[in-house]
Image (cartoon, helix red, strand yellow):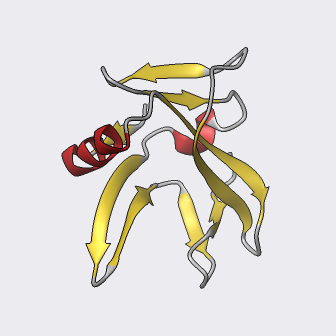
């Protein structure tokens, strides 16, 4: 299950999105990159209903995201969604690419 903080819920509601694809894809210098984008439901997706929006998670991404929290942070002038994932073992200096424990 993916958790989401109250501030992240508020920010997603402000963006007025219905379905958000949350996943991982191969790439980057550490091996994986997170996917976080508006999308439509596809066959095999896990749909997590948060009332006014849904997270869509494909089958391949599910084990990597289980236990993750989606947060929204403000650091100086920058604001962004942040993924707090206990399954990450390292991340790239660029902050985009991550590596996971063996799953």
Residue 20 image offset from top left, x and y in percent: 52, 35
For residue 100, what is the image quadrant?
bottom right
The count of marks equals 0
Q: Quadrant of the C terminus?
A: top right
* Extreme residue toward the left, this view: 6
Up/down of 84 relative to 62, above or below: below
Residue 21 image offset from top left, x and y in percent: 58, 37
Which residue is nearer to you in this view: 33 or 67?
Answer: 33
Residue 24 image offset from top left, x and y in percent: 67, 48
Residue 12 image offset from top left, x and y in percent: 35, 42
- Relative horizontal placement of residue 76, taking residue 44 as reference (left or right): left
Up/down of 29 relative to 33, above or below: below
For residue 95, what is the image quadrant?
bottom right
Name the residue located 56 percent from the left edge and 28 percent from the top edge. 56
Which residue is nearer to you in this view: 24 or 99?
Answer: 24
Q: Quadrant of the N terminus?
A: top left
Name the residue located 63 percent from the left edge and 20 percent from the top edge. 41
Name the residue located 59 percent from the left edge and 73 percent from the top edge. 91
Name the residue located 42 percent from the left edge and 36 percent from the top edge. 2
Which residue is nearer to you in this view: 31 or 41?
Answer: 41
For residue 15, what is the image quadrant?
top left
- Relative horizontal placement of residue 81, taking residue 90 as reference (left or right): left
Up/down of 34 relative to 103, above or below: below
């Amino acid at each position: 299950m993916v958790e989401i903080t109250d501030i992240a819920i508020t920010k997603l509601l402000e963006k007025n999105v219905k379905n958000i694809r949350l996943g991982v894809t191969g790439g980057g210098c550490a091996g994986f990159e997170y996917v976080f984008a508006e999308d439509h439901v596809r066959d095999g997706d896990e749909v997590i209903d948060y009332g006014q929006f849904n997270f869509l998670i494909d089958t391949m991404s599910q084990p990597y995201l289980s236990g993750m929290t989606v947060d929204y942070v403000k650091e100086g002038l920058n604001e962004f969604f942040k993924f707090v994932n206990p399954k990450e073992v390292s991340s790239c200096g660029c902050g985009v690419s991550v590596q996971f424990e063996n799953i």
